[in-house]
Every structure is written in C-alpha cells, then in structure tokens.
C-alpha cells in the first residue's frame, strides 16, 4: 500500500468517532498524510517510539495492540514462563496503552502483572525478574517531548529485548492485521485473575534492594545533606522520596514539576541531558538550602545533577562527568573497605568518556566498552551471573545520564544513582568540599577529556533513509584531519573492522555488529556517529583530550565546527 491507500483503509475501518474526526481533519494536508501513513511504525530492538495520533506511522491503541500481540505471539512460541509484567509512566495515554498490552497478553493465555500506578522503568526490569516473567513492557518515551510515547520491550533477564527475539516479534507483527477486536475488556480479564496488579510488596523489595547498594549510607544523616529534587513531571517522585527519605536526606521538591503531567508544561523537553531541564530547579535552589540539585527524567531511568558554584549560580555536570565521578566514588570507597573482588569489572558504552577507563585502571579494575544501549551493559551482568560471579560487576554507565550499581535490574536506574550522588555529596560536605572541587581533581589527575553530543534530527516520510545516507556518506569520505587533528584510525562497528590508517592493518572488533562509525584522533580524542534505532536522527559524539582544559576546549570546538559543516 502507498500512503493514500493506507489512509483510505483507516478511514473505512469501524473506528470511534474521535478517531474518524482526527482522520478527516488531515484529508487536505499532503505532508501530514505522508507522515502518518507513509509507512508502519517500526518495531526495533528497544520496541517502538513515535508521535501519538491516528495513523499507521503513529503511536495509538491500534499500533500498540499489534506490537503487544506480536510480543505475545513470540512469547507463546517459546519455553519461557508464560507471564508478563507491564509498567507505565506519566505521559498521555500511558495507562491506556499499558492496559491495551495487558489485554493482548491475556487473550493469548499469558498471565499479566501490571503496576497499579506510575512506576519507573528500572522497577519494571526488577519486577520481570522478581515475578519470574518471560517478558516485560514499559509504556514510555523516556525523555522525549510530550507528543511522544513508546513501547519498551524486555526479555526474561530484565534487559531490553535483544536483536534475535526482536526480529521474531517484528515478523509476528507483520502477520497481524489492524483493528482485530479485543475478545474481552481489561476489566473482565482483571476480574478473572488473568491480569493482576503488582502489589506493594514488590515496591518494598525494590526499595530494600536499592538501599542495600549504598556504599556508606551512614554519612547521609550525619552530613545533614540538603537537595533540591525534580521528577520532571514523571515517575520518580514516589521512589526517590521513599529511598532518600529513609536514608535521612533533606529534600526540597520543585512543586511545579512534582505532579505527573503529560504536557510537561514547565519543561517542554524533559531530558536531563539538557541544562534547560533544570531551569525550574535553579529557581527553587536560590531560596532553599541546597548542596545538590537532582533531576530524574519522566520514566526515572536517567538522572542529572547541578552543584552550587559558590557565586550564587549552579554548574550542571554532563552525563559523562557524573558517570566517572560516581565510578571514582564507588571504586575509592570499596577499595578503602577492601571488598573489590578479584576480576571485578566496570562497564561503559563506547560513546561514553574513555576517561572512565583510566579511573578503573587506577583502582586495578577492568573497564569494558560495549555498544550503546543499556541492554549491552545488562548482557555483561548476565555473563557474570551465568558464571556464578555477579558480584564482580561494580558499576555501569552511559553518557546519556544512565547509571547502575548492582544486578537487581538490567537497565539504568535513576533511583540508585540518586542515592549514590547523595552519598558522594555527603562525604564531601563532611570534608568541607563539594562535587565541583573533586571533579577538577579528577581532570587534573587523569587528563582533560571534554565531550560534546550533537543530534541531527531529520524530518519527512523518508527521514530514516536520510539518516542511512548520512552514514553511507561518512563511510565513503573519511577525512584526513578533523579540527586540525589527524584521523589515525577508523572503527566501523557495522563491518566489525578497525583499521589503522598509518600502516593499513586491520583488526576485528569483538562486539555485535551495529551501524556505528568512529574516527580516531590518536591520543587527542575521537568522533563517533550513530543513527538512532527508534527515531529519525543521527547522533555525533565528540571527545577531545588536552593537557589543560583550555587546550581540550579549543580542540573540541574545532572538531565540532568542522563536523557541523
């Protein structure tokens, strides 16, 4: 079908009046018709994400139902437990979509556990394992703007779904027609016991498990730590207050962002990677006692912090900076206790700061670099678990503000990260220092590794094709220099080959294949290009290394300027 045939098919279907009105309203809008019906919304390894609305290329109860039916068909074909767990965040339609998924599973004879209220993504990962489920789903679009929502899919290990099962789910979805009526209502399946709400006992087990990951919790009460916290209108409010409150942290909440709000009226783009996400927090922190500002994204799997600069303002740490600060804190504290096991590992994504490698090496711990996506960090945990050595996993992080200590979840967790931030801040407060003091010490000790991320967002019905062409062009035209630094090597994670441009030697990259390209700038840094798997955009990750902050910044600016052209 072309986009007009798809549109006509939807218009002819027996749909509710509000959907028919929405379809009629775009009849004379060619761009909107192409955008909504140019293709079917794609199911990738992380599930689906898209703008909400009527259409085959939009997220709505019909595209969500097909995805859930595909998941159910895949699970039914396996020997995995015929149980599923579902969570959802504060976005518009999240609860509705969660109930749609629960019905699709129940129809297939799969018992479904559903959170009875908003729950962070890591709590879904936790529940999958605690309840012995074969799969899980979170309804969330993470940190995207309010027009978006998504379906994140998880396997039995609590990790986001890997390529193999996702390919099967995609194939199953392709065989399922649109608009298959539900056999029974959500309420009917709930009353029959085929759908069960997740009880408070799971919440309490989660809290106890997170608190058990504390390195030195006694410091929190002793230091009298004061934080300003924003859940950015999402799911973090209840669990962050529960965990930090039990540990004695004094919390001032940003009230205008405390309640769930799918419009994110006080934070149009609720992404903790951006400084603007903490704008309301800065206002509150000017009047409230504040050692640290904490902000969690809508599904509370990412966290960002800002620290008073001593001059009446605040400095926000990047995701990389917070990652290697927490890494240094955990390794230093555990080294002092003498409880780091032999053969311990830490894990980062390939796009995260290699400064973390130097920190890990300083403490005699291995740092593994894996593909982007926390499921790959979870995969390293699984390998250790299969060997009976899960305690060897110390810490994992991604530059996009995602962190995990412990093996209780297989996704990034803003709750445990918030606790570790508070521990770090409390330990420094007792010494008369703050996080910025130690950040500068880390740079002085290990080198100034400055980073920048640029996201090129593409539009139109052929946006994904544009992204593919951008990657193809980069592969075809490798620059000799970037920002004045010589390109010394190329790592193509799609072919699995790393090439040294000086002598032409090639080595195999021991990672799964992925459409990622890296230009190496010797010991001066790197440029990495990676298209999103769920959205029409290409992200560029820049790292520049210098003996001084000024030298690193000058190189970084030159590299970004050349690539941006």
Image (tube, rainbow, N blue to C red):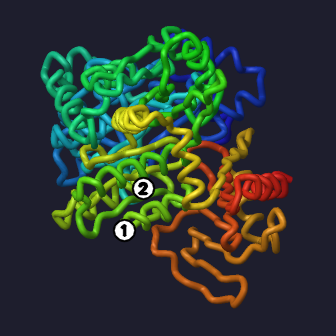
Residue on which disc 1 sits: 364
Q: Disc 2 on helix, strand or loop?
A: helix
Residue on which disc 2 sits: 167
Q: Position of residue 203 (x, y in %)?
A: 22, 26
Q: Is residue 342 visible?
A: yes
The answer to whether marks 1 and 2 mark residues whose Cβ atoms lie closer than 8 Å is: no
Q: Which residue is rendered at x = 52% and y = 81% of the image?
A: 508
CA distance for labels 1 and 2: 39 Å
Q: Which residue is rendered at x = 82% and y = 62% of the image?
A: 483
Residue 242: name its quadrant: top left
Within 10 angstroms of label 2, few (less than 14), some, or many (20 or more) residues?
Answer: some
Q: In this view, does 33 lie to the left or right of 321?
A: right
Front one among 231 and 261: 231
Q: In this view, does 456 lie above or below 292?
A: below
Residue 65: name its quadrant: top left
Q: In this view, does 302 lie to the left or right of 333?
A: right
Q: Is residue 168 visible?
A: no
Q: Which residue is rendered at x = 16% and y = 63% of the image?
A: 388
Return the residue found at the far front: 432
Within 10 angstroms of label 1, few (less than 14), some, or many (20 or more) residues?
Answer: some
Q: Position of residue 50 (x, y in %)?
A: 56, 33
Q: In this view, does 182 lie above or below 350?
A: above
Q: Where is residue 52 in the image (x, y as percent from the top left)?
A: 56, 25
Front one among 563 and 545: 545
Q: Give whichever of discs 1 and 2 has the lower sequence position.
A: 2
Q: In this view, does 237 lie above or below 101?
A: above
Q: Where is residue 486 in the image (x, y as percent from the top left)?
A: 78, 73
Q: Which residue is rendered at x = 17% and y = 32% of the image?
A: 205
Residue 346: give its label: none
Task: Give the quarter of the figure containing the N terminus.
Answer: top right
Q: Is residue 437 above or below residue 79?
A: above
């Amino acid at each position: 079908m072309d986009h007009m045939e798809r549109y006509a098919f939807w218009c002819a279907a027996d749909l509710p009046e509000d959907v028919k009105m929405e379809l009629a309203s775009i009849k004379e809008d060619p761009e909107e018709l192409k955008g909504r019906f140019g293709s079917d919304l794609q199911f990738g390894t992380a599930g689906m994400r898209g703008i909400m609305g009527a259409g085959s290329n939009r997220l709505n109860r019909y595209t969500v139902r097909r995805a859930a039916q595909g998941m159910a068909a895949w699970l039914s074909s396996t020997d995995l437990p015929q149980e599923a767990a579902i969570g959802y965040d504060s976005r518009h339609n999240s609860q509705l979509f969660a109930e749609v998924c629960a019905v699709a599973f129940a129809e297939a004879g799969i018992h479904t556990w559903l959170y009875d209220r908003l729950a962070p993504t890591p709590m879904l990962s936790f529940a999958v394992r605690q309840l012995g489920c074969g799969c899980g789903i979170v309804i969330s679009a993470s940190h995207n703007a309010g027009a978006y929502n998504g379906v994140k899919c998880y396997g039995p290990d609590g990790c986001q779904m890997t390529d193999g099962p996702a390919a099967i789910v995609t194939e199953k979805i392709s065989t399922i027609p649109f608009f298959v009526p539900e056999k029974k209502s959500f309420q009917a399946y709930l009353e029959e016991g085929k759908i069960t709400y997740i009880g408070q006992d799971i919440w309490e087990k989660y809290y106890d498990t997170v608190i058990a990951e504390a390195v030195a919790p006694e410091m929190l009460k002793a230091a009298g730590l004061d934080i300003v916290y924003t859940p950015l209108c999402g799911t973090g409010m209840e669990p962050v207050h529960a965990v930090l409150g039990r540990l004695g942290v004094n919390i001032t909440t940003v009230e205008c962002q405390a309640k769930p709000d799918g419009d994110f009226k006080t934070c149009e783009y609720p992404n903790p990677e951006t400084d603007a996400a903490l704008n309301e927090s800065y206002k509150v922190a000017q009047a409230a006692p504040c050692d640290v500002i904490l902000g969690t994204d809508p599904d509370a799997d990412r966290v960002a912090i800002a620290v008073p600069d001593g001059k009446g303002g605040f400095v926000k740490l990047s995701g990389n900076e917070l990652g290697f600060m927490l890494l240094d804190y955990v390794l230093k504290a555990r080294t002092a206790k003498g409880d780091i096991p032999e053969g311990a590992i830490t894990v980062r994504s390939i796009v995260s700061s290699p400064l973390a490698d130097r920190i890990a090496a300083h403490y005699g711990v291995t740092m593994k670099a894996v593909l982007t996506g926390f499921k790959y960090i979870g995969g390293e945990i699984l390998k250790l678990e299969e060997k009976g050595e899960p305690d060897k996993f110390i810490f994992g992080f991604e530059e996009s503000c995602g962190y995990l200590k412990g093996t209780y979840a297989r996704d990034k967790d803003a709750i445990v990260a918030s606790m570790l931030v508070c521990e770090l801040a409390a330990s420094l407060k007792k010494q008369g220092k703050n996080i910025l003091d130690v950040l500068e010490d880390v740079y002085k000790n290990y080198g100034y590794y400055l980073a920048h991320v640029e996201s090129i967002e593409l539009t139109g019905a052929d946006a994904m094709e544009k992204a593919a062409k951008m990657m193809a062009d980069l592969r075809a035209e490798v620059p000799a220099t970037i920002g004045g630094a010589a390109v010394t090597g190329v790592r193509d994670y799609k072919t699995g080959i790393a090439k040294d441009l000086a002598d032409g030697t090639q080595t195999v990259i021991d990672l799964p294949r992925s459409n990622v390209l890296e230009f190496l700038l010797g010991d001066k840094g790197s440029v990495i290009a990676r298209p999103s798997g769920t959205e029409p955009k290409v992200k560029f990750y820049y790292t520049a290394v210098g003996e001084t902050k000024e030298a690193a910044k000058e190189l970084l600016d030159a590299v970004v300027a050349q690539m941006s052209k």
